[in-house]
Image: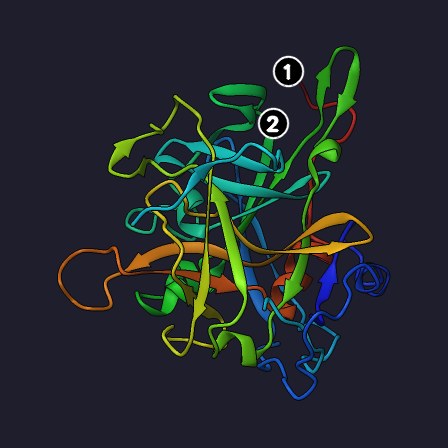
Amino acid sequence: MNVFVSSGKKLVSAFVAVLMLVLSVTSYASMEVSAVNSLKNYKVFDAQTGLEVGGYYLEANPYEDNTRGVIGEDTREADYSLDGVVKIITSEGAGTGFVIDDHTIATAAHLVFDKANGTLADSNTVVKQILIVTGSNQIERSITSAHDVHVPSKYITSSDPECSAYDYALITVSDELIDGEWKALEDYTCFNLGIMTDGIVNSKKQLVYCTGFPNRVNVEQVNFDDDPVNKFTGSGYVIPNLAPDLERRFCYDIDATNGNSGSPVYVKTTYDGVEYYTVIGIHNYTLDTDNDGFFDDESSGIRMTTDLLHFYKNNPNIEYIEGEGTEA
């Protein structure tokens, strides 16, 4: 399996180093990645107040989109193996995110921006807590030092369904004083980021996974907004040609319910006896593709593109407080 991945700090140069970690299991030499590189506009909101603190344009990713990468009844099971999958509690509800690096968490835009009431000057959402969970209802760390929230301007200004193609965001987290030591999220980075080719998004071949904090599993309530904190993993396959914007979105038959928003959709690769996890998308919604009034048919997420890699890993507009944040 040929995978174009990024890991570590927000440096594009890291792409090349991590590329060697994943061996070719299946060859897709003729496949290409859709060209979606373009200038993007983002709004920045204070995570503690929801008020706008700035905005910026992020230039198109300088790397071409001709790199090749692949991702390749309710079956979800409790899974606490990935500490980097975190529960995000906001003033509007709760969902999931995942650690990108020491000070950055990826999630869905609709989790941190109130589409119904937010504006360009006020997201109408406050990030209250970010929970790192190591066991059933076992919170290892409660982070209250969220600094900024970055949301695509097109998500704010567009109407559905177009805005769902931009339903991704990031949260920056300041350092916290823990046992006399300033710490960020360096202990919880467990994912690479990778790009899947058009060939995989259009064919049901590769097993994919989604880990998060759903509110219900098998009709049973397993999570509320604040408590308990139960993490589940589901698996399934990409569904070809179903997403309305195949350049930016994809669909898969993984069970997902409210609370899964912002979850990583990822693949597993074993190299030299070590298992690696590569995120190829961010979960957004469950769809009603048969129009029966129930949103329970297929799940939909944002494709990880080179634009998103640029946003998460090579973004010069990331701000946080280092070494003098809050005391946990």
Three-letter amino acid code at the position of disc 2: Ser
Q: Quadrant of residue 55?
A: bottom right
**Is there CB contact under 8 Å for labels 1 and 2?**
yes
Q: Does 242 sit above or below residue 130? A: below
Which type of secondary structure does the marked residue at label 2 adopt?
Answer: loop
Q: Quadrant of the C terminus?
A: top right
Q: Quadrant of the N terminus?
A: bottom right
The reply to whether residue 225 is visible in this rendering is yes
Which type of secondary structure does the marked residue at label 1 adopt?
Answer: loop
Residue 328: give its label.
Answer: 1
The reply to whether residue 122 is visible in this rendering is no
Q: Which residue is mark 2?
A: 145
Few, some or many residues within 10 Å of mark 2 (<14, 14–19, 20+): many
Q: Residue at x 63, y 71 (%)?
A: 70
Three-letter amino acid code at the position of disc 1: Ala
Q: Is residue 321 left or right of residue 230?
A: right
Q: Does 84 sit above or below residue 2? A: above
Q: Is residue 54 left or right of residue 103?
A: left
- Colouring: rainbow
